[in-house]
């Protein structure tokens, strides 16, 4: 009898098709369209394209193409994590970071340059970090409104290789960005934070986050400063998304660059 049952189970097992490995690139267009439509962003004929190397979305206002990094997609394993990568790029587009950079270049091109390369590099790194956090916050909004789990942003960030200093301090990779996403999600979408995210990377991050929160709670000024930052993030991100809709897929910086370029 046991042999008969085993034979039946074997036949059933062999008859069940083996699912192909998850292919993040194949999901980018579908996930990207969901992020737009479920947030009421009605832009027609938007194409999401996977590219290798540096990502440049500075021409989105004219070509309606969102380039997605294949390197970033390598850290994804499901639609939530693909949404984290795609939503971050949309966050940069909605914020107009590329057009802002163009305008800054136009303004400073005729000015005398400072030969202090170290100071310049530090300033660029600070600006880059600031823009990434701004894009991450918009990404949280887009994902939460589309039914994706915004905590997947933390998972994708912390799967990456940390810097020397992060490793030395025992921090996860991209710790500051991940903590910013964690704090903002708890502020704007507390139910999402409470639900959590079922994977080891997220569990490990929460252990780190709890130590940060414990230290923060011991300093009222630090907590008060964070509360103000989160309120500002919420107000600005919602405003940017709303204006992006009303302009038909252009950020304020896109519109400003268009006017400068027309002169």
Image (cartoon, rainbow, N blue to C red):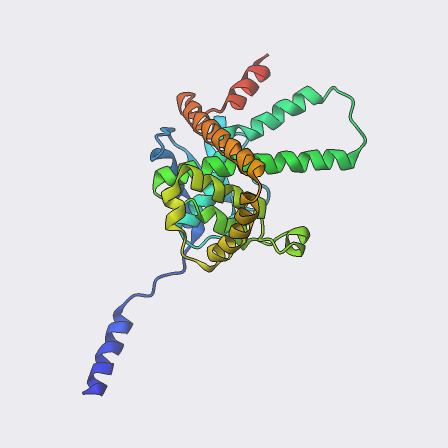
Residue 120's spot in the image, x, y percent? 74, 33
Can the viewer see residue 49 in this picture? no
In the depicted view, which residue is nearer to us: 241 or 9? 241
| Quadrant showing the C terminus | top right
Q: Position of residue 253 (x, y in %)?
A: 54, 23
Say whether residue 252 is visible.
yes
In this picture, residue 138 sits left or right of residue 259:
left
Asked which quadrant contains residue 258, the reply is: top right
Q: Is residue 156 left or right of residue 44?
A: right
The quadrant the N terminus occupies is bottom left
The residue located at (58%, 51%) in the rendering is 173
Asked if residue 210 is positioned above or below residue 47 in the image, the reply reads below
| Position of residue 111 in the picture relative to residue 196 (left or right) | right
- Residue 262 place in picture, x, y as percent: 57, 14
Q: Residue at x 51, y 21 (%)?
A: 252
Residue at horizontal 43 percent and vertical 21 percent from the top: 247
**Camera-side residue of 24 and 233:** 233
Residue 75 percent coordinates (x, y)? 50, 53
Q: Is residue 260 above or below residue 114?
A: above
Q: Viewer-proximal residue, 159 or 250?
A: 159
The residue at 41%/33% (across/down) is 46
Q: Residue furthest top?
A: 263
Quadrant assignment, res 145: top left
């Amino acid at each position: 009898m046991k042999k008969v049952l085993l034979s039946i189970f074997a036949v059933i097992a062999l008859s069940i098709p083996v699912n192909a490995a998850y292919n993040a690139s194949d999901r980018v267009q579908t996930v990207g369209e969901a992020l737009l439509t479920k947030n009421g962003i009605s832009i027609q004929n938007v194409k999401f394209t996977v590219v290798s190397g540096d990502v440049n979305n500075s021409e989105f206002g004219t070509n309606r193409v969102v380039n997605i990094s294949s390197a970033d997609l390598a850290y994804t394993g499901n639609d939530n994590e693909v949404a984290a990568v795609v939503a971050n790029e949309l966050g940069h587009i909605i914020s107009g970071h590329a057009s802002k950079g163009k305008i800054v270049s136009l303004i400073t091109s005729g000015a005398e340059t400072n030969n202090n390369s170290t100071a310049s590099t530090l300033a660029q790194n600070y600006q880059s970090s600031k823009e990434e956090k701004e894009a991450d916050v918009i990404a949280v909004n887009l994902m939460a409104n589309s039914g994706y789990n915004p905590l997947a942003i933390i998972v994708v960030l912390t799967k990456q290789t940390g810097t020397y200093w992060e490793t030395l301090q025992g921090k996860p990779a991209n710790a500051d960005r991940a903590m910013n996403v964690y704090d903002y999600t708890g502020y704007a979408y507390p139910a999402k934070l409470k639900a959590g995210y079922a994977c080891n990377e997220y569990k490990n991050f929460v252990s780190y986050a709890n130590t940060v929160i414990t230290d923060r709670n011991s300093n009222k000024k630090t907590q008060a400063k964070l509360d103000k930052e989160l309120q500002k993030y919420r107000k600005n991100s919602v405003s940017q998304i709303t204006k992006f809709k009303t302009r038909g897929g252009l950020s304020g910086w896109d519109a400003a660059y268009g006017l400068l370029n027309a002169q």
